[in-house]
Amino acid sequence: MDLLLEVKDLRTSFFTYAGEVRAVDGVSFHLEKGEAIGIVGESGCGKSVTALSVMRLLSDTGKIMSGAVTFDGEDMLGKTEEEMEHVRGNKISMVFQDPMTSLNPVLRIGLQMSEVLRLHQGMTRKQALAKAAEMLDLVGIPNPRQRLAQYPHQFSGGMRQRVMIATALSCNPQLLIADEPTTALDVTVQAQILDLMRGLKDRLRTSIILITHDLGVVAGMASRVLVMYAGKIIEEGPVKSIYSRPKHPYTWGLLGSIPRLNAKDKRRLVPIHGQPPDLIEPPPGCRFNPRCGHALRICLSQEPPLNEIGSAHQVACWRYHPQAPPLVLETQEGRSAS
Amino acid sequence: MSAPLVEVRNLVKWFPVAGGLVFTRIAAHVKAVDDVSFSINKGETLGLVGETGCGKTTVGRTMLRLYEPTSGQLFYDGIDVFGLPAKSLLTIRRRLQMMFQDPYASLNPRMTVSEIIGEPLDIHHLVGSDGERKDRIHELLRLVGLNPEHANRYPHEFSGGQRQRIGFARALAVDPEFMVLDEPISALDVSIQAQMVNLLEDLQDRLGLTYLFIAHDLSMVKHISDRVAVMYLGKLVEVAPSHELYDKPFHPYTRALLSAIPIPDPATEEKRRRIILEGDVPSPIDPPSGCRFRTRCGEAQPRCASEEPSLVEVETGHTAACHLLS
């Protein structure tokens, strides 16, 4: 087993005027070389903050409180800012959600792309531009040479996201973190970008962490999925068993909230009631208990640990404790509870 | 079958683009909606789907005359809405209402919830006394699943999903018959979307509402709509009963659109064959000649560049605009 990234008990907080927001609260996971994993959850669940903590890109109000991040055998949290600059964009790259704001509007694409290569690879201007053109070609942008002389406003949203991916991959990083890379795009363009990412993953053997709220996007891309809720990982497993046999009532609810395109008859959606909790004062015990239809008394006071229940499938739910009454989740199309 | 409640005929909406350095003149037009016709029956939900910039929101807004149409007609229950003088719009807008996409921008942050929902009641003189007004506001809040005790709060005290409920209550205040729902759920989280969709469906049944549901999320549109209309670059390309559109899409664009949607099921995802469209949507200022989709269509023929296809009935109640079908 070739371990690339290991995150252990990561805790990240933001200090606001209202109090400490525990955005990430004890998250542990690992990633192997060449593997693609998905982190899924709704807004505010801590999925982006987890990625930003790994990259050490938190804003001034954010602070990593405890935990360990080991990347390729090196401790990331102990590195100085200067050492981190050598890692970012070089060994770990990130693609952000909004292709409209991640490029500088007053600089030519070529300059922005070659900056990374000159800084990390020590290339000359000419070499860097040649490499940038090669990368644009790789991500399917026609006339790469001419395109390098253009400004971001001359590119469409999908094209800009291609530029971002090309830039992120130009130093041949070992890990690519894609934070909602297709959320701002139309479905047909999303399909283009996902297709591109799948192709590049196989060709360049880059490990990928795909962060998204769209369960459909993860299904076609990742081999393993982590489901986050209110700053914690509540379920983790191979993509197939998560989708066909989700264990946590939250994962179950999330899948029940999406209408199925291939469903034969019209059925009512099964929403999750209520709102996600306030992370300044999260509910005691299991954080999902106020919205859970299956909560026991223990769920209100004690936090459930992440336990292995099947092959590589882990869930943080008291209902899977040997002494708990058996949990029967109502059947949904194509899914069973067993 | 009785006459449809809403009938749109040859709706056109062009937006002028100003140009010129010293004297501004109209340099071109954005052909946002270009000759669109459809009808909606009473109690029905018509889904209108398409990608960014295809003109779906413009259709909805023009129908309520939030934009003045360039040409075309709209008959609502036999009334020629586009022919009405501006003064009479108040009466028709009691029957036609709209719900907007952005829950953060569509509510005035300086007004309390009761002021927001009470405003249409005052404008249309629907309540006599203050007590009656308060009762009606509380009733509306209960109807959309909000706590009436929160009537004196401001929008910032609510989450996105709750704000959309307030926007819905405001639209319902005048007892409308027909509602344009412009991407009412796309700004919401997945688990909250399902709550909102169930609420929209419940109230449609209870109040006998007719919806035009505008969205880009095809799986949600399929779920909520009886019939679905697909738009591309200002034109309708296919209209069909929703299950039929998904089972038997005729137009190449509809097929590409459907195949692009990721399905939350890894087994299905593995087996699916995707149609990946090349390139981007052309500019609506200077759309391609003939069929507007031909520049991205894998099956385009010489005829598609010269002749514009019109919507033809391919099966009962299922129309598509494509030369390959004739």
Image: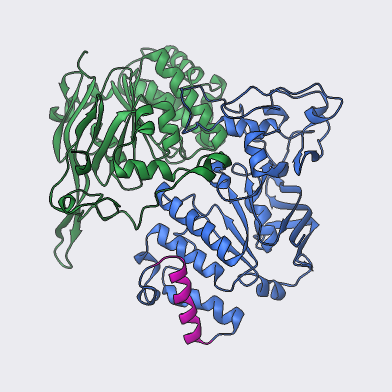
Chain colours: A blue, B green
- Horizontal and vertical percent position of residue B238: 27, 36
Foreground of the two, A263 or B273? B273
Q: Is residue A85 above or below residue A63?
A: below
Which of the 4 image quadrants contains residue A311? top right
Foreground of the two, A305 or B303? B303
Residue B107, visible in the rendered structure: no
Indicate the quadrant containing the N terminus of chain A: top left, top right, bottom left or bottom right. bottom right
- Answer with left or right where residue A37 lies relative to residue B109: right
- Horizontal and vertical percent position of residue A5: 73, 60
Q: What are the residue bounds of the magenta stretch?
A: A124-141
- Answer with left or right where residue A267 lies relative to residue B31: right
What secondary structure characterizes most of the magenta part?
Answer: helix
Task: Give the residue at x 38% y 27%.
Answer: B243
- Horizontal and vertical percent position of residue B97: 32, 26
Which of the 4 image quadrants contains residue A321? top right
Residue A42, visible in the rendered structure: yes
- Horizontal and vertical percent position of residue B21: 18, 68
Q: Is residue A188 magenta?
A: no
